[in-house]
Image: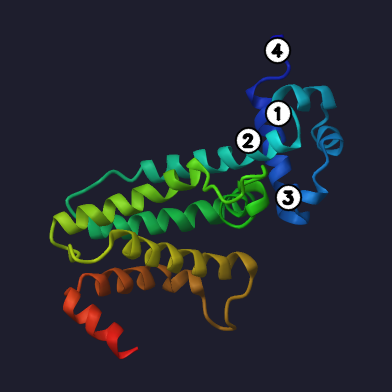
Amino acid sequence: MARLKTHDEALRLRLLHRAAATVFDRGTAALSLRQLAADVKTSTTAVYSLFGNKAGLLRNLYEEAARLFVARLAAIRPTDDPAGDVIRLGLVYREYAIANPHLYAILFSDRSVQCPSESESEKPREAIETYRPLVDAVRRGQQAGQFSSESDPEVIALSVWGTAHGLVSLVLSGNEPPGLAVADCYERALGVLVAGWRESVGKVQGFADVL
């Protein structure tokens, strides 16, 4: 049966953004399809027509958060300075998180939304898509001689992602150290990290041996 015209994309997006706010504030257990319909002033029939059930809603919610994030990353076109591109991707990460804290939490914090099915050990395809631009930029940096070809590009990318995620999480949670504006040192931190990876692999390995 075809969807009613009132069950359109605009309604789907309103439901998803309201659901994201609910999950962000109170967790997935508090997400009720009946209450969601009431909040958006539509019928439960519309919700079921669009998503099937709660698991379908959660899956759509994760996919929408990932779609918007990947679109933001895709706006960063590759340049002849891949190391700079890595930093720019890190800045986009922060911009997305600050502009869309509810969707950011869905995408990077809540495993029950990422994997609402029984196969929770499987990494969602969307999670790979959000990570690929960063890894690709690192690989281009290796080809350009900016990063050592002996270093694992996944490790370099993970260190950048982890730094970005940690600093963004401090800002969003309000747990910044007193008197220290994390946002002000964000780009500097990414720059220092990327500069470190541009050092020779011998120096990196030598430092690791000391630890």
Q: Find numbered disc 2 in the image and state the secondary structure of the residue it sits on.
A: helix
Q: Position of residue 48 (x, y in %)?
A: 77, 26
Give the CA distance from mark 3 to mark 4: 28 Å
Q: Where is residue 10 in the image (x, y as percent from the top left)?
A: 65, 26
Give the CA distance from mark 4 to mark 1: 15 Å
Label 4, on which residue? 5
Dot in front, 4 or 1: 1
Dot in front, 4 or 2: 2
Q: Find numbered disc 3 in the image and state the secondary structure of the residue it sits on.
A: helix
Tell me which colouring the rendered structure shows: rainbow
Q: Find residue 60 and name its label.
A: 2
Depth check: give the residue in front, 143 or 5. Answer: 143
Give the CA distance from mark 1 to mark 2: 7 Å
Give the CA distance from mark 3 to mark 2: 13 Å
Q: Tag 3: Cα neighbours inside 10 Å, few (<14), some, or many (≥20)?
A: many
User: Do callouts 3 and 4 mark residues in contact (Cβ within 8 Å)?
Assistant: no
Q: Position of residue 134 (x, y in %)?
A: 35, 53
Dot in front, 3 or 4: 3
Look at label 2 and name its amino acid: Asn
Of callouts 3 and 2, the N-terminal one: 3
Q: Tag 4: Cα neighbours inside 10 Å, few (<14), some, or many (≥20)?
A: few
Of callouts 4 and 2, the N-terminal one: 4
Look at label 4 and name its amino acid: Lys
Give the CA distance from mark 1 to mark 3: 16 Å
Label 3, on which residue? 23
Give me the residue at 38% from left, 65% from top.
160
Q: Tag 2: Cα neighbours inside 10 Å, few (<14), some, or many (≥20)?
A: some
